[in-house]
Image: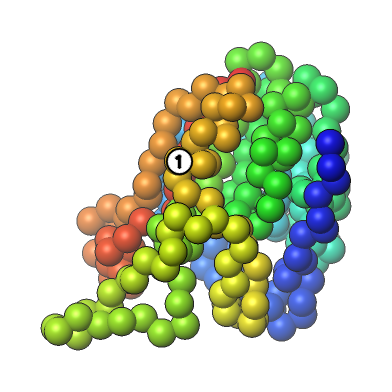
């Protein structure tokens, strides 16, 4: 199999990391992510499970999994900054933090009972290779739950949004069917992500041998919008895609 290219490591850019660290989902943890209740509904019982957390960031989910009974967690991230912060906030010998590039990831066969990833896979160019690696690392019947930027959202990323005749922001779709590299200015210029259509994402899971169990194009609830009116913009187009699949 051809070796994948090295991923862009924007999170070790000092300015980017400083600004990223101020996001609510980083200062507040899992409860700071509007999608967390929807994700939690997809999770199996953690008790006794060997978990791999892919793109673990500050380690919020890894610690949550252990607090809810996981036997062990292997938490992986490309960023030195992420790993250092996660280690500093973790006091649990059953969580092992490992620096690794998801593009070149190697995992032991049949070593895990559950795999999780939050907002990391859209940074990976060779998605089929990554899924094959995860599939081999899971025992039969194990579940994979992950979130990515919704491909409609990624295809709509432009520096200047359009407005309709009433002055409301609109979200123009830019070459949705053209897959591959997309660059955006988000805390830094030229952040590299990889656009795949919804069909490609689902069909890659199926071709790898996963059984797709749940697909959710996340939108905030009315209660969440009432609590945080800025979330109303998320009703215009899906920003996040939540998926659950079984090996």
**Mark 1 falls on what kind of element?**
helix
- Residue 199 figure quarter: top left
Q: Quadrant of the C terminus?
A: top right
Q: Is residue 102 left or right of residue 182?
A: right
Q: Is residue 213 above or below residue 25?
A: above
- Judging depth in this view, the residue of 5 and 212 nearest the camera is 5
Where does residue 3 sit, x and y in percent of width and height? Answer: 85, 46
Question: Could you say which is closer to the camera, residue 48 or residue 54?
Answer: 54
Q: Position of residue 236 (x, y in %)?
A: 27, 64
For this view, does 141 lie left or right of residue 40?
right
Q: Is residue 73 visible?
A: no
Q: Where is residue 242 shown, x and y percent of the image?
A: 46, 43
The image quarter in which residue 198 lies = top left
Q: Residue furthest left?
A: 166
Up/down of 89 relative to 41, above or below: below
- Quadrant, the N terminus: top right
Q: Residue shown at 75%/65% (left/top)?
A: 8
The residue under the point 42% across, 31% down is: 214
Disc 1 crowd, CA 10 A, few/some/many (<14, 14-19, 20+): few
| 62 horizontally vs 212: left or right | right
| Residue picked out by circle 1 | 199
Q: Is residue 168 above or below residue 83?
A: below
At x 33%, y 53%, the residue is 219
Q: Residue 25: image x %, image y %?
A: 54, 62
Q: Going by the image, does 233 lie left or right of 125?
A: left
- Specify how the rendered protein is coloured: rainbow
Q: Is residue 35 above or below residue 109?
A: below
Total labels: the figure holds 1
Q: Nearer the viewer, residue 192 or 35?
A: 192
Q: Residue 221 or 216: which is nearer the viewer?
A: 216
- Residue 100 seen anywhere in this rendered image of the structure: yes
């Amino acid at each position: 199999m051809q070796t994948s290219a090295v991923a862009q490591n924007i999170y070790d850019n000092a300015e980017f990391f400083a600004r990223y660290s101020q996001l609510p989902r980083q200062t507040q943890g899992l409860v700071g992510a509007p999608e967390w209740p929807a994700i939690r509904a997809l999770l199996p019982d953690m008790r006794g499970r060997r978990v791999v957390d892919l793109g673990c960031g500050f380690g919020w989910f890894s610690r949550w999994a252990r607090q809810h009974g996981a036997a062990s967690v292997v938490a992986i991230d490309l960023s030195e900054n992420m790993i250092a912060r996660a280690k500093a906030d973790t006091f649990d010998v059953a969580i092992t933090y490992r620096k690794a590039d998801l593009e070149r990831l190697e995992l032991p066969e049949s070593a895990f009972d559950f795999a999780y990833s939050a907002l990391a896979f859209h940074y990976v160019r060779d998605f089929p290779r990554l899924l094959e690696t995860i599939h081999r690392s899971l025992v039969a019947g194990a579940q994979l739950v992950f979130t990515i930027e919704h491909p409609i959202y990624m295809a709509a990323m432009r520096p200047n949004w359009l407005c309709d005749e009433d002055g409301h922001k609109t979200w123009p779709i830019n070459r949705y069917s053209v897959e591959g590299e997309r660059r955006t200015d988000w805390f830094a210029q030229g952040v590299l992500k990889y656009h795949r259509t919804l069909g490609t994402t689902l069909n890659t899971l199926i071709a790898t041998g996963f059984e797709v169990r749940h697909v959710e194009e996340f939108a905030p609830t009315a209660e969440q919008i009432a609590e945080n009116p800025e979330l109303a913009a998320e009703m215009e187009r899906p920003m996040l895609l939540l998926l659950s699949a079984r090996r």
